[in-house]
Amino acid sequence: MKPPENRLATRRVFEGRLLKVDADTVRLPNGAKVELEMVRHPGASAVVPLLSDLNGPDPQLLLIRQFRYAANGMVWEIPAGVLEPGESPEQCARRELLEEVGATAERFDHLTSIYTTPGFTDETIHLFLASGLKVADPAHQIDEFITIETRTISAALEMIRTGELMDAKTAIALLYVAGFRLNM
């Protein structure tokens, strides 16, 4: 990605396995010069795994419950993961669907792409809908503690409404599907 035109300087403060943190000197639209901390992220993809026909009465999908240290427990999510070097967002979504739920899909549709928290990170997540699933055994990584659950779209939306499902990428993807893809 090309650096922003208003970035005057950058200094790497931290480099970890997944994230990098830079202190950028930036000229704001009003001409002021400030230093901002920026979390650099390679980007990610997430996928809504659809088990039944989207135009059926209450389509079924797969959700995962995954241990997340930052959330201090199990979190409801859709399969997602970080883009590997040279990998397209769709390739990443396909890989994560296979790794996390053991599924392949006949069809992948790009829903939208979102900035997760543009106040301090450049992370973009590409959201997909996968249909025509063939489910087998997942291949979880050593640091993944995941259970797979089937839910109807209406049940998943209720989980968002009640606050049981709090993961932002998952909520946005499911609300996008409900708002723009369902014939309800």
Image (spheres, rainbow, N blue to C red):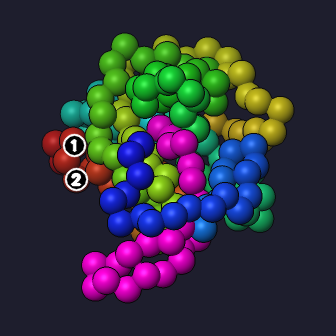
Q: Residue furthest front?
A: 8
Whether label 2 touches label 1, CB < 8 Å: yes
| Residue 109 located left or right of residue 100 | left
The residue identified by callout 2 is: 179
Whole-percent x, y for residue 73 in the image = 76, 60
Q: Residue at x 63, y 62 (%)?
A: 11
The residue identified by callout 1 is: 182
Whole-percent x, y for residue 111 in the image = 29, 40
Q: Residue at x 43, y 26 (%)?
A: 88
Helix, strand or loop status at disc 2: helix
- Front residue of 1 and 96: 1
Local crowd size for mark 1, using a 10 Å CA cut-off: few (<14), some (14–19), many (≥20):
some
Q: Residue furthest left?
A: 183
Local crowd size for mark 2, using a 10 Å CA cut-off: few (<14), some (14–19), many (≥20):
few
Check the image and report above or below for 161 versus 3: below
Residue span colored magenta: 24-45
Whole-percent x, y for residue 70 in the image = 73, 63
Classify residue 48 by image quadrant: top left
| Residue 6 located left or right of residue 170 | left
Q: Is residue 173 in sight in this rendering?
A: no
Check the image and report above or below for 10 versus 83: below
> Could you say which disc has been placed on residue 145 in the image?
none
Helix, strand or loop status at disc 1: loop
Asked if residue 94 is among those painted magenta in the image, a careful observer would answer no
| Residue 180 located left or right of residue 36 | left
Amino acid type shown at disc 2: Gly
